[in-house]
């Protein structure tokens, strides 16, 4: 494991959360410096881990490093103490909501939810979507190809994963945009610096309330009709003897599938097109040989890491070599930095669709929380690239200057102007 430098790196890690005006360069420089100068950094109330080895270790050690927010931890208590009573109760409600998600659970509680999700979200259910995904991709691209200029993120990359996951769960189209908006409001609090919580808590609370209302509407609709979608099957599963999960748990699973299932896949498709269309030789290689496409998708996930980082809490005192982590400390695994760790990935700052070990990236995490939707998002991204390179091989990027999402947890291009061309 890595030695810890005596002098901590002099950088304000919190600064890169803002990254106005959405440029991404700062974040890669920072990760590079962290890996080389301070791969294990104690900064304010968090420990940042920047190497592949450390991140993989923490993510694979679900007993030592647990998910979810430590309610009694010093930082949570400090945030609560700084809020007025109304905002404090909103903060508690948002935390309660997030704690119900699968990613926030541990041990038996996580295993039960994951088991339920695995029962319906099977490799077979995903494989059954292949033709549907392909039809949707072709239909949408054909419509967009009529135009001279298209924002492929807003007009395509957002809708595709949202449509597919919503169809699998039978979420009505009328509710899909509302769920997306609610999620955008909630991202304000996810990963926010403690000092910013008072500014973002009202919006996050409004987003959460909206999300809950919309999910209850979906359940009501389902009660009025017999359906066989995954959502209905999950609701039926909780009636099995021995199952302790409740309707609220199912709402949490479904909410997370919709939210996790659309934003990150949108970001993967946007980043893939940005990288490939700006690296023309690599685009042409895919046009000439479609068998390269699956690895190109892995390289995008490695190089751009739609989920930039994941947090855990140390359940007990842990030592990484002589670096001590106390019980209750928050640990940030910088996946995006791990995915560019030169110890594993040669020329790690170079985008290379032929990279042999691209698939070893940590973009979908490791261990018990490994992404439930990895196979689905891979299938969607592969379908998009194979259709575009086959039907529109002369597609061009119209603007090279792009804005990257100003969110420290997620990364994607906000808009990407292209001209689709056969
Ligand atoms: C490229 C697209 C995607 C990326 C980069 C991504 C990334 C991730 C990551 C990093 C985690 C682990 C979080 C942790 O360890 O705390 C995760 C978990 C999860 N993802 Fe994805 N995801 C993607 C697509 C999807 C899709 C399409 C779905 C739809 C079902 C989905 C559903 C989930 C769920 C339910 C979990 C929680 C699993 C658990 O806690 O056991 N994701 N995802």
Image (cartoon, rainbow, N blue to C red):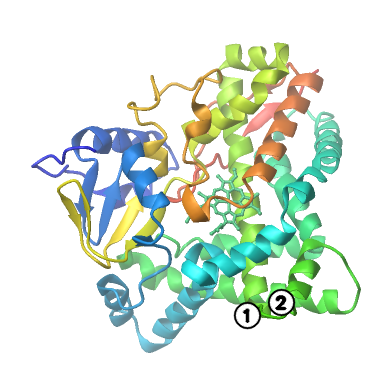
Report the disc number at residue 238. Answer: 2
Picture layout, residue 246 above or below residue 252: below
Q: Position of residue 220 (x, y in %)?
A: 80, 79
**Where on the picture, by quarter, is residue 217?**
bottom right
Image coordinates for residue 182, horizontal then vertical, percent:
61, 66
- Image quarter hosting the N terminus: top left
> From the viewer's perspective, is 163 left or right of 332?
right
Q: Is residue 228 above or below residue 224?
A: above
User: What is the number of callouts on the image?
Assistant: 2
Is 329 positioned to the left or the right of 362 in the image? Answer: left
Question: What secondary structure is marked by label 2?
Answer: loop
108, above or below 62, in the image: below
Query: Marks 1 and 2, how far apart in space?
Result: 7 Å
Residue 259: image tag: none
Residue 150 figure quarter = top right
Q: Position of residue 199 (x, y in %)?
A: 40, 69
Q: Quick one: which residue is furthest to the right in this view?
A: 225
Residue assigned mark 1: 244
**Residue 144 is at least partly visible in this image:** yes
* Residue at image location 25% in from the left, 73% down from the top: 74
Q: Is residue 105 visible?
A: no
Q: Is residue 380 left or right of residue 391?
A: left
Work out whether residue 363 or residue 234 is closer to the camera in this orientation and state it: 234
Sequence-first tag of 1 and 2: 2
Q: Mark 2 near ligand 1 (CB under 8 Å)?
A: no
Q: Which quarter of the image is occupied by the C terminus? A: top right
Depth check, front residue: 391 or 338: 338
Where residue 333 appears, x then y in whole percent? 36, 49
């Amino acid at each position: 494991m890595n030695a810890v430098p005596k002098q901590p790196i002099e950088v304000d890690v919190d600064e890169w959360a803002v990254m106005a005006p959405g440029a991404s360069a700062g974040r890669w420089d920072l990760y590079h410096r962290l890996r080389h100068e301070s791969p294990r950094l104690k900064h304010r109330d968090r420990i940042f881990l920047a190497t592949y080895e450390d991140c993989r270790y923490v993510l694979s050690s679900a007993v030592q490093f647990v998910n979810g927010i430590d309610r009694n931890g010093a930082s949570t208590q400090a945030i609560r103490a700084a809020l007025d009573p109304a905002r404090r109760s909103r903060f508690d409600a948002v935390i309660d909501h997030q704690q119900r998600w699968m990613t926030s659970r541990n041990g038996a509680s996580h295993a039960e939810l994951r088991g339920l999700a695995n029962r319906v979200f099977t490799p077979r259910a995903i494989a059954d979507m292949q033709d549907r995904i392909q039809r949707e991709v072709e239909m949408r691209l054909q419509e967009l190809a009529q135009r001279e200029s298209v924002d492929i993120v807003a007009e395509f990359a957002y809708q595709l994963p949202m449509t597919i996951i919503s169809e699998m769960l039978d979420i009505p189209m009328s509710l899909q945009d509302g769920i997306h908006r609610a999620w955008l409001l909630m991202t304000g609090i996810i990963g926010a610096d403690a000092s910013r919580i008072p500014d973002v808590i009202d919006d996050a609370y409004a987003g959460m309330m909206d999300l809950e209302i919309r999910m209850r509407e979906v359940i009501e609709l389902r009660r009025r009709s017999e359906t066989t979608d995954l959502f209905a099957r999950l609701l039926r599963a909780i009636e099995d003897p021995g199952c302790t999960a409740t309707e609220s748990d199912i709402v949490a699973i479904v909410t997370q599938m919709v939210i996790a299932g659309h934003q990150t896949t949108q970001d993967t498709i946007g980043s893939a097109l940005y990288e490939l269309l700006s690296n023309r030789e690599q685009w042409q290689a895919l046009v000439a040989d479609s068998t390269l496409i699956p690895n190109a998708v892995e390289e995008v996930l490695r190089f751009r890491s739609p989920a930039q980082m994941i947090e855990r809490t140390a359940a007990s005192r842990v030592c990484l070599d002589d670096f001590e982590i106390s019980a209750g400390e928050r640990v940030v695994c910088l996946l995006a930095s791990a995915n560019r760790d030169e110890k594993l990935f040669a020329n790690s700052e170079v985008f290379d669709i032929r990279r042999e070990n691209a698939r070893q990236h940590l973009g979908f995490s490791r261990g018990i929380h490994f992404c439930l939707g990895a196979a689905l998002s891979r299938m969607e991204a592969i379908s998009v690239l194979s259709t575009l390179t086959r039907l529109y091989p002369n597609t061009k990027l119209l603007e090279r200057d792009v804005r990257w999402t100003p969110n420290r947890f997620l990364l994607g291009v906000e808009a990407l102007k292209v001209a689709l061309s056969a």
